[in-house]
Amino acid sequence: MPRLTGQQKSLWLGMLTIVCVAQAPTPGYTEEMSTQSDQALIPELELIKEEETVSIASRYEQPISQAPANVYVITDEDIRQSGAPDIPTILRRIPGMEVMQMSGAEFNVSMRGNNQVLSNKLLVMVDGRSVYVDALGFVFWKMLPVTLPEIKKIEVLTGPASALYGFNAFDGIINIITKSPEEMKGTTVQFGGGELGTISSSAIHANKIGAFGYRLSVGRDQNQQWRDRDALAYRSHKFNLQTEYALSSLSKLSLSGGLVDANRFDGPNNDVQINAATPALGYAHVTYERPNFFVRGFWNSVSDTTQGLTNPLLGTLVTLTDRNGNTSGKARTNTYNIEAQHALDVGNSHRVTYGLNYRHNTVSHSHITEFTREDRLGLYLQNEWTATPSLSLVMGARYDLDTFVTPTISPRVAVLYKAAQDHVFRLSGSVAYRPPTILETKADIRGVISLPPLSPSPPPTVLQGSDNLKAEQIVSYEAGYQGWFLNHRLRARASLFFNHLSELVAPTPSSLVNGGEADIYGGDAGIEFLATSWLTGFANYSYQEFGQTFTGIGRRGMPRQKFNVGLRAEWDNGLNGEATFYHVGSATYPIGQAFTSLSPFFPAGVTTPSERVGSYNLLNLRVAYEFWHQKAEAGYMRDAEVALSVFNALNDTHKEHPLGDTIGSLVMGWITVRY
């Protein structure tokens, strides 16, 4: 009989634990948790799935069925039960999400078929503060300034939302909402460790003293490369402090700040190069809010030093440098933002929301022509009209000014019809824009091709940005449905969409230009259900097609279909677990011309990578045991839990982009203590 490897033993142990737990009889409550011992008498309220409230669609809290956009929520329980060490892995459960892992440090994330290398069309926020780096058009997904236990929920809006949020809310928005000091009172310590040298650790302390509350957190994350298990892909340390002061029962002032410092970041992958970076991200954020009004200001800073490493397939044939011939580079960006919003009710049927924001970006970068500044100003207005108890109309528009592009107007219209209790239909249309980044406008990059002896090398090429670039545009139409069945124990959702993209920025051999059009259209459908008091689940499916006139590296690529299924069980003796299965169809992505034009000079045995990546399946498992659960004198719950998680339990090794790493499986152990 063949011997099992350590990884196989861990996988079989996890699967055996799930089987044993599933076969175990449902235990009674402990005296501490409940006085009820007869599980046959389940209170009716325990079998009702509550509808979430969200703020992402209209910038105020409202039931998700009344939102004028397609919105999903990932709860803190979803995050805990996933066993994932990073947020992109958690986001895979959302229908229409495009998650592309390039390396042990880099992810590209977008929505509805519009993903790419160096993805730049999704607005990502933490507590309403943008973490999208305007000057670079990039999100450091592994370096988000929050530890996993601090997250209360993640709201995901699929589709354009520039009408309220302005530039970069192109494919959609993600807002990561953290827990208040009151919600996280006490001390929480979490440590996860496993294969590939993976560590995900955090310590958080929060308290509230009278009107003043605070939350302090530190974290450390690291993991090795997929392509070289002996080489470090990512290591970071993070520090965050959030404070809030209740000025009255209805108003508060919040102040937060932090730093995430990575001494190794394997990426970003820009086709020809795989950079080795050491980025550091800092921020400060202040907010005053009261009902129907807020004012917010923040500062974001990115400092990065990169060493440009040519893709190993190209060997020494290609080298990218700055204008002085250096392969290493430095970048520093600063973003200063202030915004305010006010809402008021007009009569009994109108709610009017209006606001403005000003943003100032600065960047110095080895690969741009000069130190550059950018100013942005946006004003928006939205009216929600409740025409009848079953019919409402939402209309809004935003006017944006930017240093480098002509002014833009981003409208949105949505009609919501409540056909019956708990059944809502929605039709919507919107326009959104993404302006060219400073890096695209002011690019100055040299490419040196060094052919083998006896083959004359061509002269160096220069890739330059352009001050004449236009803002990218998306025009989107969507129809959606959301309904509850089986006494609020099952929710069904479905949507159809059509997106027209134009003026996308793409590189040519010597410059960056706008050009081409693409139509992406499709739909998704899914259910979420509460089967019993201890078993819940979800399933969804998405399909998309596209037509395009883009050529070369600017071509769109996407999997046509994806489906996700998940089951979660939680028993009263502390045992719990989750199994999720993700299928992603095959896709074709463009790769740089260098891989084909220089292929005759590749060493023996090295071939041009195929643009097609095959379909793949991910089975993620987690089993856990909560061995301590007690109410503290201060009123919050103390608890402790150990867990085992397996990412890609089937070990379906695969690439998610032709130039990305081959992704395998990962087994981790976790312990979380709150006291």
Image (cartoon, rainbow, N blue to C red):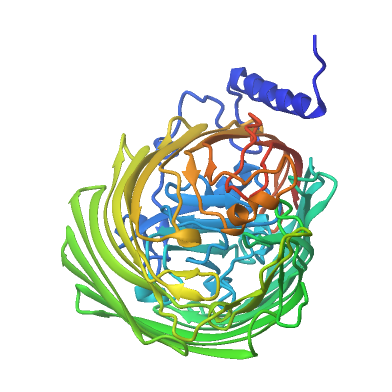
Task: Determine the residue located farthest toward the right in the rendered image.
Answer: 230
Residue drawn at x 66%, y 55% is 148
x, y percent for residue 175: 51, 64
x, y percent for residue 473: 36, 71
Does residue 477 show up? yes
Q: Is residue 464 placed above or below 592 in the rendered structure? A: below
Residue drawn at x 47%, y 60% is 552
Q: Nearer the viewer, residue 75 or 159?
A: 159
Examine the image and state in which quarter residue 388 appears.
bottom left
Examine the image and state in which quarter residue 16 appears.
top right
Horizontal side of 414 relative to 48 (left or right) equals left
Q: Nearer the viewer, residue 417 or 654?
A: 654
Task: Determine the residue located farthest toward the left in the rendered image.
Answer: 388
x, y percent for residue 334: 64, 84
Q: Which quadrant holds the N terminus?
A: top right
x, y percent for residue 225: 76, 49
Does residue 626 show up? no
Q: How many marks?
A: 0
Horizontal side of 172 relative to 322 (left or right) equals left
Residue drawn at x 82%, y 28% is 6
Horizontal side of 238 relative to 663 (left or right) equals right
Examine the image and state in which quarter residue 592 appears.
bottom right
